[in-house]
Image (cartoon, grey):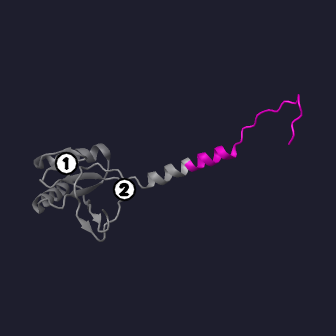
């Protein structure tokens, strides 16, 4: 379209490219948020299992490292106080399940004691976390 001299043209703001950029940003954030998993534990080397799958619910996290140290939501907890700490966490967060993350080198006795403490806290829904066999 030709513009004659003396005729002023108002600048236009094209909305379609802005909408495309906005949609791409929204899609990116939605896609990333679907694959983010909230880890409240300590870094441990989980055992591998063929049937491991990702949990899609909020739970209290109890972690056991290779030395047998126990962590509740990333905070170290003495074994004797684990039951009370789980009860306190349950009442403060209202999460009714526990995910037990134990290092592959952790003592079986420590894992059983942690399971016993979780059951004594009155929580019946307990999951053991493992990595899928093909995971790095």
**Residue 12 falls left or right of residue 81:** right
In this rendering, which labeled residue sits more in front, label 1 or label 2? 1
Q: Nearer the viewer, residue 56 or 3?
A: 3
**Residue 14 falls left or right of residue 106:** right
Q: Hey, which residue is sitting farthest top in the picture?
A: 6
Q: Quadrant of the C terminus?
A: bottom left
Task: Report if residue 133 lies within the magenta region.
Answer: no
Q: Position of residue 125 (x, y in %)?
A: 27, 60
Label 1, on which residue?
Answer: 71
**Residue 3 falls left or right of residue 28:** right
Q: Position of residue 36 (x, y in %)?
A: 40, 52
Identify the residue shown where x is 64% and y is 43%: 18
**Distance of label 1 from label 2 (alpha carbons):** 20 Å
Task: Report if residue 13 lies within the magenta region.
Answer: yes
Please give the range of residues in magenta.
Answer: 1-24
Label 2, on which residue?
Answer: 57
Residue 44 badge = none
């Amino acid at each position: 379209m030709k513009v004659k001299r003396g005729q002023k043209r108002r600048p236009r703001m094209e909305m379609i490219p802005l909408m495309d950029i906005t949609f791409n940003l929204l899609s990116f954030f939605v896609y990333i948020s679907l694959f983010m998993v909230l880890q409240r534990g300590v870094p441990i080397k989980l055992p591998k299992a063929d049937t491991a799958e990702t949990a899609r619910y909020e739970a209290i996290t109890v972690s056991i490292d290779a030395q047998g140290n126990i962590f509740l939501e990333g905070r170290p907890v003495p074994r004797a106080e684990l039951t009370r700490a789980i009860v306190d966490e349950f009442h403060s967060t209202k999460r009714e399940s526990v995910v037990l993350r134990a290092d592959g080198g952790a003592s079986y006795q420590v894992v059983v004691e942690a399971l016993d403490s979780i059951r004594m806290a009155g929580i019946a829904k307990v999951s053991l976390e493992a990595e899928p066999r093909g995971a790095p």
